[in-house]
Each structure stands twice: as structure tokens, then as C-alpha cells.
Image (cartoon, grey):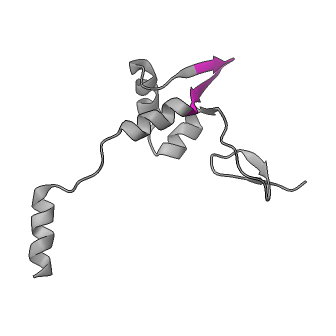
Amino acid sequence: MELYRAAGGYLCQRGKPVEAPVAMSIRAFCQAYSVGRSLAYRLIADGNLVARKAGAKTLIDRASAERWYKALPGYEPAPRIVKMRARLKD
């Protein structure tokens, strides 16, 4: 049985579909969503992320992390940037 490290840092078998774990550590959340630990703990405190404790380890519910990410606003460049790029094309 050949194992490899998949996205998120967990081990899985080569050739088998990767199933996302139900929960992730603070570190895994921060790496997966490119945020800092302070923001992660603030999101937990504000109720935006569901967290559970397993001994000393804090685990974040993956479904709540995905809901938080999908609720983030989309990126639109500022009007001055759009105007500047239009001038550069001319």
C-alpha cells in the first residue's frame, strides 16, 4: 500500500479518490485558506467557524470553513485601476 501526502497534509493511497476530512486543525485551516492564526481564532470567536476541542487540539469543521470562504466578497479592481489599464492599452 503506497501512501502519499495529499492537499491538506493528510495521507491517502495512490489511485484512490481523496476524501476531505470532516475537520481540520488550525494550522491546516490557515494553510488551506492562506490566513493567519489570529484571524482563524477571531472567526471562531465571532461564530463564523464551528470549532471543537479534541484534548488540547482545536479542530475546525470543514463545512463551516467552506461556508465562510464562499461568503467572502468577490474581487473587483478599483475603478481607478480599471481606468489606468484602459489608458495603458491605448
Residue furthest to the bottom in view is 90
Residue 4 placed where, x, y %? 77, 55
Q: Is residue 90 magenta?
A: no
Residue 72 placement: quadrant? top left
Would you identify the image quadrant in which residue 45 lies?
A: top left
Q: Tell me what residue is drawn at x 8 percent, y 75 percent.
A: 87
The quadrant the C terminus occupies is bottom left
Compared with residue 17, is residue 30 higher up or lower down, i.e. above or below?
Answer: above
Locate residue 1: give its quadrant.
bottom right
Q: Is residue 29 above or below residue 90?
A: above
Residue 36 is left or right of residue 52, and the answer is: left
Report the magenta stretch's main SS: strand
- The span picked out in magenta is 52-62
Residue 83 percent location from the top left of the image: 9, 66
Looking at the rendered structure, the number of numbered marks drawn on it comes to 0
Q: Is residue 19 left or right of residue 27?
A: right
Residue 86: x %, y % from top left: 12, 72
Q: Is residue 61 magenta?
A: yes
- Front residue of 35/24: it is 24
Side of 83 where 73 appears, left or right: right
- Where residue 80 sits: x, y (%)? 10, 60
* Residue sitting at x 38%, y 20%: 46
In the picture shown, does residue 53 fall above or below 5? Answer: above
Residues 72 and 58: in front is 72
> Quick one: 22 or 88, which is closer to the camera?
22
| Residue at 77% across, 49% down | 12
- Residue projecting furthest to the front: 17
